Image: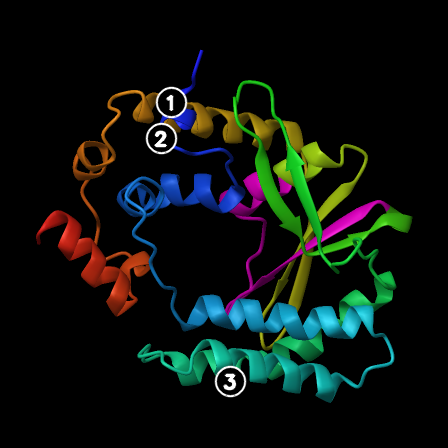
C-alpha cells in the first residue's frame, strides 16, 4: 500500500525536517508540499561557516588555526554577500573565536575518518514504524574511537543537549548502533561537549513525530489544502529572512 509520504513525493525524512515540523509546521508544509524553498538568516550561515573552518582544521591537523579561521570567514562572506540580515556583522564576529575554541578541543580526538570521495559520511537508515528512510550527514566520525561528534554553534552556551539535537543524535545512533554520539556546542567564549544518553528514548520521539507527519499527510492529497490548513507564526525567527516571509505572505495572504 502506498504511504502518504509517497503520495506527496516525500521519499525520505531527516532530523532537520522533523524538527521543523515540530517547531513551525506551516513552514514545513510550504517547503515540503508546495516546493517554496526559503532562505536562512546569518545565524545559520555562521554555523555552516564555522563547521567548514573546523572541518579543515581536523582533517588537516597541521593547518594553522588562522588559515581555518580565514576559510570560515570567506565562506560566511560568500553565503551572506546578498544578505539583508541586520545581525550579519554580529554573527560574523563570532566565527573566528569559535573556530579556534572548537579546534583546541576537537583536535584531541585525532583526525576524523573520511568517507570515500567526501569528508563527511552520508547516512541512510530505516527506523521501525516509519515507511521512508532517514537521511543525514555526520559532521565528524571518529571511527577508531566509535564516536560521532556533531558540531553546533551558538552565541550562548547550552547547559545540555536540546530536544531537537537529541532527536538528530538518535538517528545517527540508529545508523551506527555501536557508536557514541556527542554534541559539541561552541560559542565565541567556550565549548561544551555532551554525550547523548538514552538514544533509544529519543528515537521513539522521532518515530512519533514521523507518524504524526504521516497522519497529517493522509488528510488530503492536495498540497495546498494541507498547507493552508496551517497558520504561520511570523513572529518566529524561522520567518526572519525577508524572502521567506514574502513567500509565506504569498501563500497565506496575510
Locate residue 194, reporting x and y percent: 68, 51
Q: Which is nearer the eye, 37 or 70?
A: 37
Q: Which mark, residue 4?
A: 1
Left or right for 97, reference 142 = left
Residue appearing at x 46%, y 24% in the figure:
208
Q: Give the foreground label among 3 and 2.
A: 2
Q: Is residue 105 magenta?
A: no
Q: Secondary structure at mark 2?
A: loop
Q: Quadrant of residue 80?
A: bottom left
| Circle nearer the N terminus (3, 1) | 1
- Outermost residue on the right side: it is 144
Give the alpha-carbon distance from disc 3 to disc 1, as whole Å. Answer: 45 Å
Q: Secondary structure at mark 3?
A: helix
Q: Which residue is mark 3?
A: 93
Q: Which residue is mark 2?
A: 8
Instruction: Examine the rendering and report whether any part of residue 17 can be seen.
Output: yes
Neighbour class for label 3 at 10 Å: few (<14), some, many (≥20)? Answer: few
Give the alpha-carbon distance from disc 3 to disc 2, as whole Å. Answer: 42 Å
Q: Quadrant of the C terminus?
A: bottom left
Instruction: Examine the rendering and report whether any part of residue 196 can be seen.
Output: no
Q: Which mark, residue 85?
A: none
Residue appearing at x 46%, y 78% in the figure:
91
Residues in magenta, as a range: 146-169
Q: Is residue 168 magenta?
A: yes
Neighbour class for label 1 at 10 Å: few (<14), some, many (≥20)? Answer: some
CB-based contact (under 8 Å), mark 2 and mark 1: yes
Identify whether 75 is placed above or below 156: below
Q: Which is nearer the eye, 16 or 124?
A: 124
Amino acid at each position: 500500500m502506498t504511504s502518504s509520504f509517497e503520495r506527496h513525493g516525500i521519499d525520505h525524512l531527516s532530523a532537520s525536517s522533523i524538527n521543523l515540523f515540530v517547531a513551525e509546521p506551516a513552514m514545513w508544509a510550504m517547503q515540503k508540499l508546495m516546493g517554496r524553498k526559503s532562505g536562512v538568516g546569518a545565524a545559520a550561515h555562521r554555523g555552516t561557516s564555522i563547521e567548514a573552518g573546523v572541518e579543515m582544521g581536523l582533517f588537516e591537523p597541521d593547518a594553522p588555526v588562522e588559515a581555518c579561521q580565514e576559510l570560515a570567514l570567506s565562506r560566511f562572506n560568500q553565503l551572506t554577500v546578498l544578505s539583508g540580515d541586520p545581525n550579519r556583522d554580529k554573527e560574523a564576529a563570532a566565527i573566528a573565536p569559535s573556530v579556534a575554541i572548537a579546534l583546541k578541543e576537537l583536535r584531541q580526538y585525532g583526525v576524523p575518518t573520511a568517507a570515500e570521495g567526501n569528508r563527511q559520511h552520508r547516512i541512510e537508515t530505516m527506523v521501525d514504524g516509519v515507511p521512508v528512510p532517514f537521511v543525514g550527514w555526520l559532521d565528524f566520525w571518529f571511527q577508531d574511537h566509535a564516536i560521532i561528534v556533531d558540531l553546533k554553534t551558538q552565541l550562548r552556551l547550552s547547559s545540555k543537549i536540546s530536544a531537537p539535537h537529541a532527536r538528530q543524535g538518535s538517528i545517527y545512533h540508529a545508523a551506527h548502533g555501536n557508536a557514541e554520539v556527542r554534541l559539541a556546542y561552541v560559542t565565541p567564549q567556550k565549548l561544551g561537549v555532551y554525550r547523548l544518553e538514552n538514544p533509544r528514548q529519543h528515537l521513539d520521539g522521532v518515530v512519533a513525530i514521523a507518524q504524526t507527519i504521516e497522519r497529517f499527510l493522509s488528510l488530503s492529497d492536495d498540497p495546498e489544502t494541507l498547507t493552508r490548513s496551517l497558520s504561520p507564526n511570523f513572529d518566529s525567527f524561522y520567518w526572519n529572512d525577508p524572502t521567506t516571509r514574502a513567500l509565506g505572505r504569498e501563500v497565506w495572504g496575510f
